Each structure stands twice: as structure tokens, then as C-alpha cells.
Amino acid sequence: MTDDRPIRIDDDPTERTDDHEPLLSVEGLQKHYPVTEGPLQREVGQVRAVDGISFEVRPGETVGLIGESGSGKSTAATSLLYLEEPTAGTVTFDGEDVGAYGRAERKAFRRRAQMVFQDPTASFDPRMSIGESVTEPLLVHGMTDAERRRAIAEDLLERVGLSADEFDRYPHELSGGQKQRAALARALVLNPDLVVADEPVSALDVSVQAEILALIDDLQAQFDLSLLLISHDMGVVHEICDRVCVMYLGEIVERGPTEELFTDPQHPYTRALVAAVPTPDPDAPDRDVTLSGDVPDAASPPSGCRFHPRCPQVIQPEQYDLDQDNWRAVMDLRMAVADRDVDRQSLRELAVAEGVADDPDAVGEAGVRTALREEFDLPDELGDDAADRVLSAALEDVAAGDVAAADERLADEFGTVCEREDPTEQATEAGHPAACHLHDETVANKGWEWASVD
Ligand code: ADP
Ligand code: MG
């Protein structure tokens, strides 16, 4: 590696950003995709991939965007870079509204804000040498001097841990890790201020992930970049980010300084993500939170808090004080009944497996009710007479084949603020905000107590 400053194509100090202003500011960003049907491609709905997110990246800062697959992270990246037009919202870059840019300004923006993708193989043309690929952006942006292009690229190849000899090699001659290094060189060749890296190590062998991550961290400092690092992997984000935004189903649910967010997560979703990170410590406390199921369909997101169908801490109705696991079990039954996802025939088969009868046809309504309790981890008693009466009646409805009646009964009795009201970001004791009713003073009966995750 050379230790002089990187060669820059135009080093204009007046272009540098004031350190106190965010370099990138995203406000109320939305990206909805139409869902179409039939030969006329009639629009029947919208996928709300990104549904109103706001955050900032300051100069020289590394911000992480995390969330499970399907949360809308990639869509957030491509729309904030205007690689596709956002549905709504404002993106401000270095004090200017990117949405109002004309063609020339867009081109300049593309130079200053680069993206690195997950799959390094797909991002290289197999017929072009690494050097041609890395220098192509320089050519596109008007640098006609081939020798100068080559000098810049060779310098960069060395800075990303390759050698200048790699200039004349072809993508198939490089390993995945080497290709991702070359992709970083190409992203840096136009001397950008911002790099958006979307899952930059997810496609690589585990053995090289740490290396590439360390390189990204190193390049960020060396080039004084603002970096938006997108990953579904908490470990990746933990490693190099200053701050983290947690995304779930198109929304940011929690944000804060990395260390604080990892040691003291304030949203049950973040808590579940953090708890799922494998820990090398065999004496670590029991992980009491697990995330079941997948991210719901962004074309019909759940009402209220979008996480409530999976949330271990979903809030109980005011009149109850049930064991939280039992309450979650009741909610799981409620969700399945609401989705008409309870099938009597499979419940009869389950009852047979449980030894209730020898033959599904011989399983009566009582057997179906037993199977339902088994299937949804419902205890024989919830410990509250009123709740038990409603639950028993609902199980009878299902066993008798009247799922609609069960649905109505359960919805009437077991409603939660989490499904009724969309939580706004609330201040928390940890010091950073989270969008969860558990932190809303006006919401009653939270019965909330959790130990910090370490
Ligand atoms: P992530 O990167 O967090 O995995 P994505 O941004 O890729 O999430 O996707 C978010 C949601 O938007 C998903 O439900 C996905 O299916 C949907 N989606 C992404 N791109 C499109 C598209 N071009 N058309 C329709 N739906 C899309
Ligand atoms: Mg993605």
C-alpha cells in the first residue's frame, strides 16, 4: 500500500462539506411498487417496500441499516440514490434537494454517491479486464487520458489490497473476495463523498468476510467517506458502524449509537435481532426472545405496529395480566384464526399423533380443541376466568367449524393497542428513540420488564 494521499480527479476544497451539516438527509422517503393483475395489468394494490423513513448520514460517518430480508433496505438504497424514483419524500445531499436536480446535476450526484452491491460477480462484465472496469467511470465522466486513468486505477487497486498487476486480469481469474476488493476500487475511482454498500460481504465466504469488512472500514477512514452500510447481519454492522437504524417492513423502528443499541435495545424487534446473534460465551444468559415466522407481505402490512403479529412483548388488553408467553400464544391463535389459517382436518391428524384417537375421523370436537391448545402452546388455564371463558368459547367455535365466530370473539376480547395504533418514535431510558408503544407513557398495562442483552 502507498501511504501518500489517494490521487483525486479534482480536489476542490470548496466542494468539501461543512462537518456540522449532514451530508445525506433522507426525509419521509417512500417507495411503493404497483401490484398488477390480469392481461390489462390492472393495479390491484401496492407493495409498500419503503414507507416513510428518515435518517441522516454526516460527513465521515458510518451508519448501518439493518433488518431481515424483505424489510426494504435495498429499496431504500436505490431510491435514496435516485437509481429509481422515490414515491415520496425528500433526499438532501450536501444541502441540495436531489429530487430537484437536472440531468447534469444528477450526473454529478452519481459521481459523488456510489453504490457497492452484494454480488461482486454480477457487477463485473466478464469480457472487460479489471482495469477497464475500474477505469470505466473515469472515461464516462470525461477523463480521456488513458495513462492517467491507469495510474489512478493501479493506485486504487493497491489501496484495496490487490496489486497493480491485477489491472490486466479478468474477473474469472479473481476470487470472490478479490472481486469485491476490485468493486470497492471502482466505487472509489470517482472520489465519492458517500458510498452506499448493500450487503457487501453477504455473498462472500465467511472466511473472507471479516477481511473485506476491515478493508471497508479502513477505506472509509482513508478517504474520509460517509458510508451507509446495509446488512441483515447484526455482526457486520456491529463491527464498523457509528450509528445504526433498524428497519422493519418499510419503517425505521429504532435508531441509536451502535454500542448502545446492541447492549440496550429498546424495540422488541431489535432485541430479537440482537439476541439471535450467536455468542461465543457458553455462560451467556438464556436468550428469552426468538423471532418466529417471516417478514409479512409488504403489500398488506399489519395494522398498528407492523411487528405486532410476531412481537414477543405485544401489549395485553388493560383488563388482563396474563403470563406474557400465554398472552403471546393467545395472539398467535388470534392471528391464525383471522387469517383463516386453522384447518380442522390437520388438527384431527395432530390429535391422532397426540394419541387422542386412532383415526382422524374418530376425533371429535373435544379432540380438535386439545389439538388447538397443543398447536398454539396454549395452557389449560390462562389464570384469568374471563380470558379463559372467551378462549374456550373460541376453541369451541373452531372445533365446530365456525372460524368466523371465533375470529369475532377473539378480536372483541383480545384487542391490543399494538394492532390499533401506529407507534411513533418515543424517547427511551437508554437515550435513543424507538417506535414502540412500550415506551409510550400514555399506553397502559405494559407489564414490561426485560433484562439488558449483553
Ligand atoms: P431487503 O433489501 O431489506 O431484503 P427489499 O428492498 O429488497 O428488502 O424488498 C422490500 C420489499 O419490496 C419486498 O417485499 C420485496 O419483495 C419488494 N420489492 C422490492 N423490489 C420490488 C420491485 N421492483 N417490484 C415489486 N416489489 C419489490
Ligand atoms: Mg436487500
Image (spheres, rainbow, N blue to C red):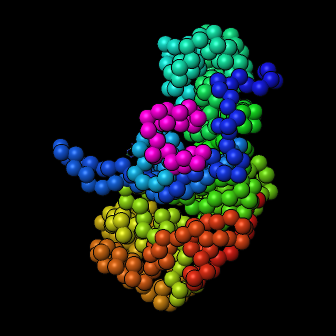
**Which quadrant: the C terminus?**
bottom right
- Residue 197 in view in this figure: no
Residue 95 within the segment the image draws in magenta: yes
Q: Is residue 229 above or below residue 287?
A: above
Residue drawn at point x = 74 percent, y = 59 percent: 260
Q: Position of residue 136 (x, y in %)?
A: 54, 19
- Residue 387 in view in this figure: yes
| Range drawn in magenta | 91-118
Residue drawn at point x = 40 percent, y = 75 percent: 369
Q: Position of residue 95 (x, y in %)?
A: 58, 48
Viewer-closest of 348 and 14 = 14
Viewer-closest of 452 and 182 = 182
Q: Is residue 294 above or below residue 220?
A: below
Q: Position of residue 142 (x, y in %)?
A: 53, 20
141 relative position to 151: left or right: left
On the image, which quarter does residue 302 sit in? bottom left
**Which quadrant: the N terminus?**
top right
On the image, which quarter does residue 435 sit in? bottom right
Residue drawn at point x = 78 percent, y = 53 percent: 282
For the image shown, how many numbered marks are present on the structure?
0
Which residue reaches farthest front? 14
60 relative position to 49: left or right: right
Residue 169 within the segment the image draws in magenta: no
Viewer-closest of 321 and 440 = 440
224 relative position to 40: left or right: right
Residue drawn at point x = 52 percent, y = 13 percent: 128
Q: Is residue 434 above or below residue 232?
A: below
Q: Position of residue 76 (x, y in %)?
A: 50, 47
